[in-house]
Image (spheres, grey):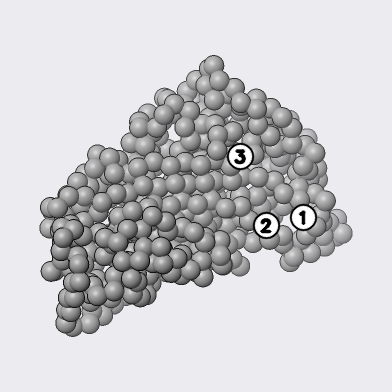
């Protein structure tokens, strides 16, 4: 039984709408009669999607700098920039006035109006679905509405059209039962990968917005030019074994969960594709995994299970900026970029890094023979986003000055708290289906050696939409 290298990510973002004036919520019935809103497709096509790439990336790095400044020394950071941007965009659909202006300013959307942003997200999720061939991608949303409370019809219609959101009534006066009902909905949309996401509901909820993107990748063999030297003839028997392996991939998945609880309860779930590289001439065998030291900082070492992988990777050493970059592709248009700063240079790299550096590194990558040493880990990262979002300019949404009159004209609503938790697992596994061996013929030149034995940065990138799905810093692989 051979080993394969795999990771899978699921991100879920949760916020919950509560009443701005708590005494008003009891026994409210508000029936609004508005004309149906029928948004149309924008003729701009891919341009609508491209509107989001740069501002979402800038917002993602602004989040990183804020979260990193607040994080305790040695703490892991991991989150979904796209998830948070999408959640705030959904929130902005119901925001008006200064509240909307602050949301758009923080997101970098000030040059666009709400209709264009909504259409861009609609197109973005269409593109994400189209880009992941031969893999399952389910995108949708829902609005769990408090029984007896009627949000504005236009809000529900916009959420349904742009974010795929169906709506259903929930009795929030029974928080335990309400949470169970919402959890059943989420579980049904994620093939039971997310079962108990919603917890600690209180009876002051007005509605819960759920946005999920469920992605399950199949095997990811590296592209053919990664698998064989172009000057080497591939034996027919090996080609046949490769074909059989690709036709019958293993189905092992590791879970990464990012959840945002409380306030405006928008649940955004991003299970990402399995990263599963094809096996090599010297397969990635569990017997190659060994104990090794990981240097958390100058004085702290932890022992990790270090995996070893020999192969041809997209690789780049940026000597001027003191980093080494490697790309691990998923099947489809998604890849994991790992950025390893030189010894003692993490703070410097964190000071300058932005979307332009990531793009530049991406463009400078070239195929090279690499011996990659990467720790197995399962890390959990959580933090409150309240102060971070306020620091980035989202202030009124948390106060009684909040204007969510696009959700309800008669009942004042506000965001009370935003928090998140993320779990990322990267591991090896052996399966019978993966036992068939494919080969990679290596060139005679000496390989580069990349040892992830100190803190490193991780980016999960979707190339067709130029989106950063996830990003973070692995400071301590041994920390749970």
Q: Is residue 183 above or below residue 52?
A: below
Q: Position of residue 339 (x, y in %)?
A: 52, 35
Q: Residues within 10 Å of mark 1 (few under 14, many from 20)?
A: some
Between the C-alphas of marks 1 and 3, the distance is: 19 Å
Query: Residue 137: horizontal and vertical position, in percent?
Result: 52, 66
Local secondary structure at mark 3: strand
Instruction: Identify the image quadrant of residue 127.
Output: bottom left
Number of the label disc, if any, that sits on residue 431: 1
Q: Are marks 2 and 3 in contact (CB under 8 Å)?
A: no
Q: Is residue 108 visible?
A: no
Q: Quadrant of the C terminus?
A: top right
Name which residue lies at 43% across and 69% down.
181
Q: Nearer the viewer, residue 178 or 417?
A: 178
**How many other residues sit within 10 Å of disc 2, few (<14), some (14-19) or many (≥20)?**
some
Find the residue positioned furthest to the top.
Answer: 299
Decide which of tag 2 and tag 3 comes sooner along the chain: 2
| Residue 473 position in % (x across, y down) | 48, 36
Q: Give the labeled residue for mark 3.
A: 377
Tell which circle, 1 or 3, labels the residue nearer the N-terminal end: 3
Q: In which quarter of the view is residue 139 placed?
A: bottom left
Is label 2 in contact with label 1 (beta carbons under 8 Å)?
Answer: yes
CA gap, disc 2 and disc 3: 16 Å
Where does residue 135 sit, x and y in percent of width and height? Answer: 59, 66
Secondary structure state at the residue bearing disc 2: loop
Q: Is residue 407 above or below residue 31?
A: above
Q: Residue at x 41, y 25 (%)?
A: 348
Give the residue number, with chain letter if any, for mark 2.
252
Q: Nearer the viewer, residue 459 or 199?
A: 199
When asked about the image quadrant of residue 206, the answer is bottom left
């Amino acid at each position: 039984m051979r080993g394969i290298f795999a990771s899978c990510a699921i991100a879920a973002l949760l916020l919950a709408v509560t009443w701005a004036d708590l005494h008003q919520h009891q026994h409210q019935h508000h029936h609004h009669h508005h004309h149906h809103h029928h948004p149309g497709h924008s003729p701009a096509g891919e341009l609508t999607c491209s509107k989001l790439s740069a501002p979402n990336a800038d917002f993602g790095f602004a989040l990183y700098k804020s979260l990193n400044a607040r994080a305790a020394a040695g703490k892991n950071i991991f989150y979904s920039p796209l998830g948070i941007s999408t959640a705030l965009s959904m929130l902005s659909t119901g925001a008006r006035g200064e509240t909307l202006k602050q949301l758009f300013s923080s997101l970098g959307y000030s040059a666009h109006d709400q209709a264009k942003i909504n259409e861009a997200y609609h197109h973005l999720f269409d593109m994400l679905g189209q880009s992941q061939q031969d893999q399952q991608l389910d995108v949708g949303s829902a609005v769990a509405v408090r029984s007896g409370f009627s949000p504005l019809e236009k809000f529900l219609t916009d959420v349904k059209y742009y974010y795929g959101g169906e709506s259903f009534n929930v009795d929030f006066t029974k928080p335990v039962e309400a949470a169970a009902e919402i959890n059943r909905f989420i579980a049904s949309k994620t093939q039971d990968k997310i079962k108990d996401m919603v917890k600690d509901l209180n009876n002051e909820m007005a509605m819960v917005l759920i946005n999920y993107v469920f992605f399950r990748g199949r095997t990811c063999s590296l592209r053919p030019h990664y698998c064989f030297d172009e000057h080497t003839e591939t034996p027919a028997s090996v080609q046949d074994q490769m074909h059989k392996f690709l036709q019958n991939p293993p189905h092992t998945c590791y879970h990464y969960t990012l959840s945002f609880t409380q306030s405006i309860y928008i649940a955004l779930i991003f299970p990402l594709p399995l990263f599963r590289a094809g096996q090599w001439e010297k397969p990635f065998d569990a017997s190659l995994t060994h104990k090794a030291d990981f240097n958390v900082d100058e004085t702290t070492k932890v022992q990790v299970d270090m995996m070893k992988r020999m192969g041809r990777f997209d690789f780049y050493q940026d000597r001027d900026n003191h980093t080494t970059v490697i790309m691990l592709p998923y099947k489809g248009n998604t890849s994991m970029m790992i950025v390893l700063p030189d010894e003692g240079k993490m703070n410097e790299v964190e000071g300058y890094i932005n979307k332009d550096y990531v793009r530049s590194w991406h463009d400078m990558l070239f195929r090279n023979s690499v011996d990659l040493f990467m720790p197995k880990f399962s890390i959990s990262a959580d933090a409150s986003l309240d102060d971070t979002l306020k620091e980035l300019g989202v202030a009124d949404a948390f106060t009684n000055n909040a204007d969510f009159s696009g959700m309800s004209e008669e009942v004042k609503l506000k965001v009370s708290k935003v928090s998140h938790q993320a779990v990322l697992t990267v591991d090896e596994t052996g399966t019978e289906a993966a036992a068939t061996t494919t080969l990679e013929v290596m060139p005679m030149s000496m390989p580069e050696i990349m040892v992830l034995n100190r803190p490193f940065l991780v980016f999960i990138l979707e190339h067709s939409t130029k989106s950063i799905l996830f990003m973070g810093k692995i400071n301590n692989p041994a920390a749970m």
